[in-house]
Image (tube, helix red, strand yellow):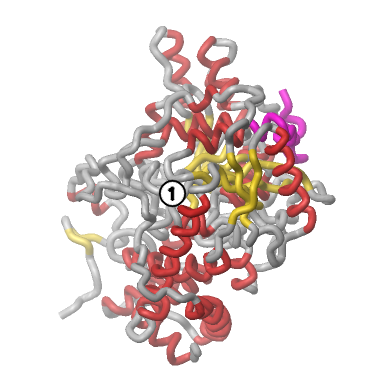
């Protein structure tokens, strides 16, 4: 069900580099896990609404973290920065 | 170097002694640091020890006591934090090369609540990378060993928390539980672990794995210590959009000694006893536990959870889908590992992530991306959320008949390090008893209920209705008092008896 091309495609979607050696290990494992997940197809879910959240009543709203960030604080963990900006490889 | 003894048998007695001046927080903290120095090089529970911060916090508590100021419920008590909880100024690695040098600029809400309660933070403890695993072998830095047998896993992903508590390196710890990551290591290490109701404890500052499943909770020596820690961290937090508004019961630490359980109905799911792969010693210990609960006055009856067999598949679809989304933030731009000399932005993303994430995290990101991708979304992710609704309905039905559900925490006692690392399906199947609790958002607790022939602890899981932690803790404390297994300590902590 999951061949190497599919794993490479999914890895591209995930922006996750996967070399051939990793693929050789991970590919069969993914196949076995997905086979286990496929067992769900046997469950009759006709008319069942999906439960995306836990089911516990909460009042969903924009979080108020109370944390104020100065630009310099944002940059403290930046791998590379320039002035008040994160530096990345040239895009254009 | 011989470890110094831990001077008190519980968090509660340590706090009381510090409050009366019988002991100083500095002395108690120094004892913990001494035990860490002596025992942790072999155990591997800690990733970061904050000696300076801990001694400074201890001195502040001692000064406050000397000045006659009111002390918090955890005043002067040394604790350890799972290293996926953000700590201001103290690195938070998530057990990953990706965040090896990451230092948060803020405290998680649970951390600030512990500090406000007077706790002393000893440092950060080991975990499976980004909390993904059941053995703490997926840490990028080193595995943690089980204090009962160093050739065995402490469980995971909160294995560092469980091992540190079991070896008496601290008086308690916080972990996180997405599919059993507090309860299973608590079972493997012979300590108590509580996963609260979803929404009960703030997730703000917990590095997200699967946002609809994650909860922070305590690991402790006994049930009453768990109640004290839970009381300190629980309650509404406006910084967490999924935080519940329910009131937190007060004085949970004052659970009566030798409580009876008359009027309590306890159910054991037929689907779990027996179950595939359940070790005979574990099954026997759970059946003895049910007898003990009955002898305490509870009515013990069988119940049914017809969709329980699908919990693991459901969990691994949903958890990996949410993980693939949550971990998209680690891109080598704003924080975390960055690959050197990537020529394009796309190469920067994919190489930084390939170098920063370990194999299990990569596996789960790929599984989750697959489950969400075009052509597979309906068959996997949408289907899993429908089955989740059925699993939740099973619990609602069961809790119409009983107050508490009892199961094994894990089908086995602690397995050997290395035994399952090459077989992820086998590793995942060991979560058979714990994942449904997260899918339904219920509170669940593991506490010791016996030992196998090799002397390894066996965990008993109890689950309750949403927000019924007080009832859960009361029943667990009554069982703990009656079962008499909680005082037994692993070889690494045997000399710590006060």
Residue B195 in view, yes or no: no
Residue B492 located within the stretch drawn in magenta? yes
Q: Residues within 10 Å of mark 1 (few under 14, many from 20)?
A: many
Vertical position of residue B467 compared to residue B439: above or below: above
Residue B77 in view, yes or no: yes
Disc 1: which chain?
Answer: B
In magenta, the rendered stretch is B478-498
Residue labelled with disc 1: B215
Residue drawn 69% across the image and 58% down it: B273
Q: Quadrant of residue B201?
A: top left
Residue drawn 65% across the image and 58% down it: B270
**A73 sits left or right of B335 in the view:** left
Q: Position of residue B431 (x, y in %)?
A: 59, 61
Residue drawn 50% across the image and 90% down it: A1
Q: B101 or B435, which lies in front?
A: B435
Q: Residue furthest right?
A: B453
Q: Position of residue B413 (x, y in %)?
A: 72, 54
């Amino acid at each position: 069900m999951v061949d190497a091309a599919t794993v490479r495609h999914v890895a591209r979607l995930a922006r996750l580099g996967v070399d051939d050696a990793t693929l050789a290990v991970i590919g069969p494992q993914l196949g076995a896990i997905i086979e286990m997940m496929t067992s769900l197809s046997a469950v009759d879910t006709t008319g069942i609404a999906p439960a995306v959240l836990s089911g516990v009543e909460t009042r969903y709203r924009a979080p108020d973290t109370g944390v104020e960030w100065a630009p310099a604080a944002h940059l403290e963990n930046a791998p590379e920065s320039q002035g008040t900006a994160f530096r990345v490889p040239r895009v254009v | 170097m011989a470890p110094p003894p831990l001077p008190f048998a519980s968090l509660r007695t340590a706090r009381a002694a510090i409050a009366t001046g019988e002991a100083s927080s500095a002395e108690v903290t120094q004892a913990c640091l001494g035990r860490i120095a002596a025992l942790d090089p072999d155990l591997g529970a800690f990733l970061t020890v904050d000696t300076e911060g801990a001694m400074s916090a201890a001195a502040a508590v001692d000064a406050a006591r000397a000045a006659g100021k009111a002390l918090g419920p955890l005043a002067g008590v040394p604790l350890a934090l799972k290293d996926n909880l953000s700590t201001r100024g103290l690195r938070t690695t998530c057990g990953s090369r990706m965040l090896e040098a990451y230092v948060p600029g803020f405290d998680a809400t649970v951390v600030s609540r512990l500090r406000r309660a007077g706790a002393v933070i000893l440092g950060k403890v080991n975990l499976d990378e980004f909390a993904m695993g059941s053995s703490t072998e997926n840490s990028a830095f080193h595995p943690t060993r089980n204090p009962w047998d160093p050739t065995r896993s402490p469980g995971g992903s909160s294995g560092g928390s469980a091992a540190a508590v079991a070896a008496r390196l601290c008086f308690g710890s916080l972990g996180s539980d997405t599919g059993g990551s507090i309860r299973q290591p608590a079972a493997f290490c012979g300590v108590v672990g509580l996963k609260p109701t979803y929404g009960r404890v703030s997730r703000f500052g917990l590095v997200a794995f699967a946002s609809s499943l994650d909860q922070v909770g305590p690991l402790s020596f006994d049930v009453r210590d768990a109640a004290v820690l839970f009381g300190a961290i629980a309650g509404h937090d406006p910084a967490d959009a999924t935080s519940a508004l329910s009131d937190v019961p007060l004085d949970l630490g004052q659970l009566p000694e030798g409580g009876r359980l008359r009027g309590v109905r306890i159910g054991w799911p037929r689907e779990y006893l027996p179950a595939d792969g359940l070790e005979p010693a574990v099954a026997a210990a759970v059946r003895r536990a049910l007898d003990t609960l009955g002898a305490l006055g509870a009515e013990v009856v069988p119940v049914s959870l017809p969709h329980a067999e699908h919990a693991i598949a459901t969990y691994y679809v949903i958890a990996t889908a949410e993980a693939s989304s949550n971990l998209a933030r680690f891109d080598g731009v704003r924080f975390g590992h960055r690959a050197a000399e990537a020529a394009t932005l796309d190469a920067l993303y994919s190489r930084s992530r390939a170098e920063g994430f370990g194999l299990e995290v990569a596996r789960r990101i790929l599984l989750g991306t697959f489950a969400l991708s075009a052509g597979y979304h309906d068959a996997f992710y949408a289907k899993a959320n429908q089955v989740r609704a059925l699993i939740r309905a099973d619990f609602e039905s069961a809790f119409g008949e009983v107050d508490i559900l009892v199961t094994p925490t894990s089908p086995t006692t602690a397995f050997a390090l290395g035994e399952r690392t090459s077989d992820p399906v086998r590793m995942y199947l060991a979560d058979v008893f714990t994942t449904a609790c997260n899918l339904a958002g219920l509170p669940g607790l593991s506490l010791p209920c016996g030992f196998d022939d090799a002397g390894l602890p066996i965990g008993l899981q109890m689950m309750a209705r949403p927000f019924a932690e007080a009832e859960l803790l009361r029943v667990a404390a009554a069982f703990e008092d009656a079962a008499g297994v909680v005082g037994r300590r692993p070889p690494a902590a045997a000399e710590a008896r006060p």
